[in-house]
Image (cartoon, rainbow, N blue to C red):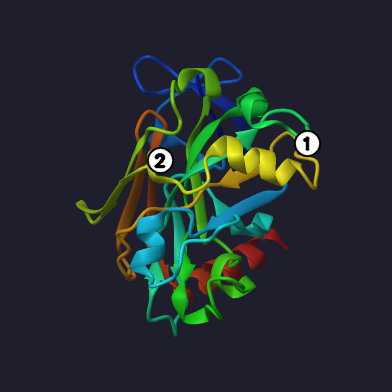
Amino acid sequence: MKHARVVFQDVIHHAIETNDGDLKLDNGQIVSEEEVVWLPPIQPRTVFALGLNYADHAKELAFQAPTEPLVFLKGPNTFIGHRGQTYRPAEATNMHYECELAVVIGRSGTNIKREDAYDYVAGYTVANDYAIRDYLENYYRPNLKVKNRDTCTPIGPWLVDAKDIEDPMNLTLRTYVNGKVTQEGTTKDMIFSIPQLIAYLSSFMTLNKNDIILTGTPEGLVDTKEGDEVITEIEGVGRLVNTIISEKHFLKTESDNAIFSQ
């Protein structure tokens, strides 16, 4: 089953996908995806992001593939929903999308064995974890400005139940910029698999329900510009639409919202 969180008529609803591709809200009402504002399909707790978890991507960026997972954390303000807008900093010269399979943890666990790892997965969603390469110190010490800017990580549209994804380690990922395929890869090329990542992270800290693991991206990065429509798609999981706006537009919108809320 596919689950979503949306705003309809100023109320937050949980929703599921109908057979016709519409949404059934938790009050029973049926609406189209254009009638709602999409939120991240869950409210994230701790979010782990993987750097250089595809060998082709590491090679593309002229870095040696890691021998231990390269993990950093992301704050909650980075996340926006399907059809959301991500701003490009005015000074940026390289703003790359990153299509990633997001693994959502379903229950708490510590010292989880690899063979038991999938028992702790609630489901999967699509993430587009934009990176501003201008801010990068180096790939082994990624700084906060690269990956923790407001709006920089669209996620969704759906949380797909784990039982509905037969093999999460064999899914095709694609990114389209203005309708053109610019990235294509497969989750089977991850350096560290989903069970490995769950076992690694839980070996030194507890994983909790609604924690998320962003599992990295394959090669095929292209600089994105203001006005671009970027679609990140993962086989069986979903098709996430996002638009790039200017920093000036974003700041004006934030200012208008602040005035309106007073």
Note whether residue 40 is visible: yes
181 displayed left or right of 15: left
The image quadrant of residue 68 is bottom right
Quick one: label 1, few (<14), some, or many (20+) residues within 10 Å?
some
Residue depicted at x 53% and y 46%: 192
Residue depicted at x 40% and y 23%: 22
Residue 250 pos. (x, y %): 50, 69
Find residue 187 and name its label: 2
Note whether residue 43 is visible: no
Q: Amino acid at mark 2?
A: Thr
Looking at the figure, which quarter contains the C terminus? bottom right
Q: Is residue 29 above or below residue 203?
A: above
Residue 30 pos. (x, y %): 46, 19
Seen as rendered, the residue at the extreme left is 180
Mark 1 in CB contact with mark 2 (< 8 angstroms): no
Determine the CA span between mark 1 and mark 2.
24 Å
Q: Is residue 249 above or below residue 40?
A: below
The residue under label 1 is 111
Q: Amino acid at mark 1?
A: Asn
* Residue closest to the eye, 82 or 182: 182
180 displayed left or right of 111: left
The image quadrant of residue 103 is top right
Residue 239 pos. (x, y %): 36, 39
Identify the element where label 1 is drawn: loop
Residue depicted at x 52% and y 40%: 193
* Residue closest to the eye, 144 or 13: 144
Quick one: label 2, few (<14), some, or many (20+) residues within 10 Å?
many
Identify the element where label 2 is drawn: helix
* Residue closest to the eye, 214 or 154: 214
Residue depicted at x 61% and y 65%: 148
Residue 107 pos. (x, y %): 74, 28
